[in-house]
Image (cartoon, rainbow, N blue to C red):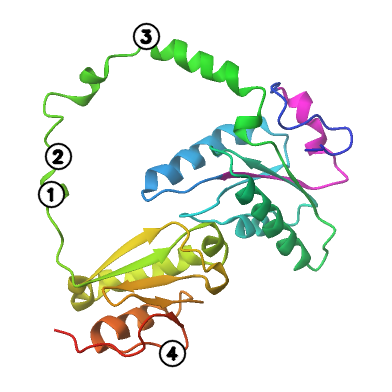
Amino acid sequence: MQPPAGCASVSSPMHSLDDISCLAAPQVQHAVVLLGRGGAGAASRQSLIALAEALRPRLPPGCKLVAAFVDKAAPSLPEALQQCMPARSIIVLPVFAPDEPALLRWLHKLAMRWRAAQAQPDIQIRFADTLLNSSGLPPILLQQIAQAAQAPDVAELAGERWQNDPDAWSQVPEHQHHALVCTGPRCTALGALAVWQSLGDAVQARQKLRSRLRLLQTSCQYPCNHGPLAIVYPEGVWYGRLVADNVAQVIETHVLARQVCPEHHVHGPVVLPPGI
């Protein structure tokens, strides 16, 4: 990555404020997007937010910092770029591993699409090297190894009853259908997290729907041009171009009224058998 003029590379192993002093240049408004991968639970999101909070005071005053996610959590990269406004120079700092060249290439395209949609498309967006390409990572890992050598054995951490899972982990919840909502990178960029949240809220609020439907997040389901996507089983009906305002109606009509929404139908049967 080529740094801004007069600025040291963000991927440099040095960490002093002098290295990134150009981010405080008064003639340009700067921002940094700390970009990670999301997860099924809230802990993965909180860990990235905690990292952002630790990094924030180390940045020059006036440099905005936004934590964002490639998939499974919000804000997405386009949403984070929007939150950086009115910055004129944005650095995207990927903090995930392993590196996936195809994913990184797509993230570049995603940033280009976002910039092209702006009223002033001259905003500079630069990507820092990924973690695995950073020359500063091996010393950090060696330090982690040294610290781990002094840590307690795993048996001390797991406890005496480590083989006994909570009872709920052995029970299959009541259900007749699964809705698999894609929260892969491309669907996330198209608003899948808002779709997931809206559908989850609707299921929790409607007891009849909650007793019949289990919601699951998935990684990429592949026909990305139809995203955000959801597949309803056991019928195997694919729905696409879902939005937060209508996803609950689409899925509830499928599960309870036994009707397929033609506007959002992508694949699978268009006529459903009667429900139980």
Contact? badges 2 and 1 (CB < 8 Å): yes
120 relative position to 152: left or right: right
Question: Is residue 75 rendered magenta in the image?
Answer: no
* Spatial CA span between label 2 and label 3: 28 Å
Which portion, as a residue range, is magenta? 16-35
> How many residues crowd mark 1 within 10 Å: few (<14), some (14–19), many (20+)?
few
Residue corresponding to mark 4: 262
Secondary element type, mark 4: loop
Amino acid of disc 4: Pro
Amino acid of disc 1: Ser
In primary-sequence order, the first of circles 2 and 4 is: 2
Residue 164 pos. (x, y %)? 11, 36
Q: Residue at x 26, y 69 (%)?
A: 204
Judging depth in this view, the residue of 29 and 244 nearest the camera is: 244
Amino acid of disc 3: Gln
Question: Is residue 23 rendered magenta in the image?
Answer: yes
13 relative position to 67: left or right: right
Amino acid of disc 2: Asp
Contact? badges 2 and 3 (CB < 8 Å): no
In primary-sequence order, the first of circles 4 and 1 is: 1
Residue corresponding to mark 3: 150
Residue 257 pos. (x, y %)? 26, 89
Q: Residue at x 18, y 78 (%)?
A: 208
Judging depth in this view, the residue of 39 and 31 nearest the camera is: 39
Residue corresponding to mark 2: 165
Residue corresponding to mark 1: 170
Secondary element type, mark 3: loop
* Spatial CA span between label 4 and label 1: 38 Å
In primary-sequence order, the first of circles 2 and 3 is: 3
> How many residues crowd mark 4 within 10 Å: few (<14), some (14–19), many (20+)?
few
* Spatial CA span between label 3 and label 4: 61 Å
